[in-house]
């Protein structure tokens, strides 16, 4: 099946009554839980009193909760995080204005394949994947600052650029607090985790999932883990973010909480903690009633930063045989993902049972 044309946006396809072929997912990948069947299973952690850094202060309690959430889920929600609500509102408003523009306007910023400079994209699935994601997005490279290419930042609506810049800066400070907690959680000095990342990089992905004519046949963003260290996600009220902590046997839909940030750990945090912290296994589903928007901020180490567990407990084996660079970790992440895609395709063609497929998937490293 040919991947969907790169030049018609899901916003435009949303006006049709049936779903285009290139967006139809495999039976096995259908969501088990509805986009609005909300769960309160993932922890909601308040950062109020984060600065009370003394024994018995709030910071100690926050640290404990964050560490527990990282160990159990790798995903949790942050409230009272101190990010200006007006900034969040403005960013959301201008984001919606951008995606409401006609296709020609959005496509002026289309990111050309292989050129990692940011811009507008449809679906953003990998070469080798037959099924497209029901989403449009804009990718902004925000840190390091010298890597910004403002010509790739849409200039409509006019205020959007400034909002993205301010939001990126706020997310950088908040992430640094989180890195301190991860570090202490691993029994290390506050600064050790961030130091190991070198020149921290950040990119923002603004996701737009238009309402979908046949949502049960489509997916907004296929199941994945992020390669990042941490990802901070702002989602609107619609719902659609789903997570699993048992390898996909059961799923939950994260309850949207106004102005909360969903924090999920990526593969980098998983390796640095030698698997003690989980890399959140998640996906985004779509619906036929409402368009959904989410803004994901990915915090990554430098490309040449060393990836190797920071602290290996006595008697424990390292998850990595030897240190690798983040670039290499990313590469392996992509190849593993493509291998999953290949096995699922084979399973479909050769009619494997779910058990057979699960066995093959569990043999991937
Ligand atoms: O839109 C969402 O809820 C999830 C987005 C996400 O997982 C990503 O951009 O990596
Ligand atoms: Fe993600």
Image (cartoon, grey):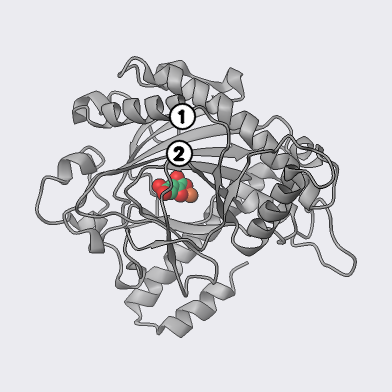
Q: Earlier in the sequence, mark 1 or mark 2?
A: 1
Q: Which residue is mark 1?
A: 85
Q: Is mark 1 within 8 Å of ligand 1?
A: no
Q: Quadrant of residue 318?
A: bottom right
Q: Are marks 1 and 2 in contact (CB under 8 Å)?
A: yes
For label 2, the crowd category at 10 Å Cα-Cα, with few meaning under 14, some 14 to 19 and many 20 or more, is some
Residue occupying the far front of the picture = 56
Q: Is 127 left or right of 328, judged from the image as shown?
A: left
Residue 158 in the image: above or below residue 135: above
**Residue at image point 84% right, 59% down:** 312
Kindly report the distance in space between the C-alpha atoms of the residues bearing marks 1 and 2. Answer: 7 Å
> In which quadrant will I find the N terminus?
bottom left
Residue 146: percent from left, percent from top: 60, 18
Say what secondary structure mark 1 lies in: helix
Mark 2 residue CB less than 8 A from any atom of ligand 1: no
Q: Secondary structure at mark 2?
A: loop
Q: Is residue 86 visible?
A: yes
As drawn, the label of residue 315 is: none
Residue 169: x %, y % from top left: 57, 24
Instruction: Please tell me which residue is depicted at 33% across the width and 45% down the height of the picture.
Output: 123
Give percent across and percent down for residue 186: 80, 53
Residue 11 located left or right of residue 220: left
Residue 283, given in percent of the width and then of the height, sits at 42, 57
Disc sitting over residue 259 in the figure: 2
Location of residue 102 by image quarter = top left
- Left or right, residue 286 beside residue 355: left
Farthest right residue in view? 314
As rendered, which of 151 and 262 lies closer to the eye? 262
| Crowd tier of the residue under label 1, counting other residues whose Cα lies within 10 Å: few below 14, some 14–19, many 20 or above | few
Q: Nearer the viewer, residue 235 or 321?
A: 235
Quadrant housing residue 128 = bottom left
Look at the image and tell me in which quarter the C terminus lies.
Answer: bottom right
């Amino acid at each position: 099946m040919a991947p969907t044309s790169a030049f018609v946006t899901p916003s435009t396809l949303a006006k049709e009554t049936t779903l285009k072929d290139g967006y139809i997912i495999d039976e096995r990948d259908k969501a088990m839980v509805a986009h609005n069947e909300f769960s309160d299973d993932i922890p909601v952690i308040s950062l109020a009193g984060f600065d009370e850094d003394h024994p018995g202060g709030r910071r100690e309690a926050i640290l404990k909760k964050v560490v527990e959430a990282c160990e159990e889920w790798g995903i949790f929600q942050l409230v009272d995080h101190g990010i200006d609500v007006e900034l969040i509102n403005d960013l959301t408003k201008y984001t919606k204005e951008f995606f409401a523009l006609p296709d020609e306007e959005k496509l002026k910023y289309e990111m050309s394949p292989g050129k990692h400079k940011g811009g507008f994209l449809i679906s953003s699935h990998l070469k080798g994947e037959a099924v497209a994601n029901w989403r449009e997005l804009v990718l902004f490279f925000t840190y390091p600052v010298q890597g910004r290419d403002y010509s790739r930042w849409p200039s409509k609506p006019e205020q959007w650029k400034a909002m993205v810049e301010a939001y990126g800066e706020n997310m950088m400070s908040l992430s640094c607090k989180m890195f301190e907690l991860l570090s202490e959680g691993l029994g290390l000095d506050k600064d050790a985790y961030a130091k190991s990342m070198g020149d921290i990089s950040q990119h923002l992905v603004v996701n737009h999932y238009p309402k979908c004519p046949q949502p049960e046949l489509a997916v907004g963003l296929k199941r994945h883990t992020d390669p990042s260290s941490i990802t901070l996600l702002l989602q609107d009220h619609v719902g659609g973010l789903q997570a699993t902590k048992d390898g996909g046997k059961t799923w939950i839909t994260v309850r949207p909480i106004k102005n909360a940030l969903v924090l999920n750990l990526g593969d980098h945090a998983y390796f640095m903690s030698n698997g003690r912290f989980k890399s959140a296994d998640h996906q985004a589903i779509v619906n036929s009633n409402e368009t959904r928007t989410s803004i994901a901020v990915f915090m990554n180490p430098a490309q040449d930063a060393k990836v190797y567990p920071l602290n290996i407990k006595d008697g424990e084996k390292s998850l990595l045989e030897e240190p690798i660079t983040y670039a290499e970790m990313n590469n392996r992440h992509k190849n593993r993902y493509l291998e999953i895609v290949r096995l699922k395709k084979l399973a479909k063609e050769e009619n494997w049972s779910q058990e057979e497929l699960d066995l093959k998937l569990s043999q991937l490293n």
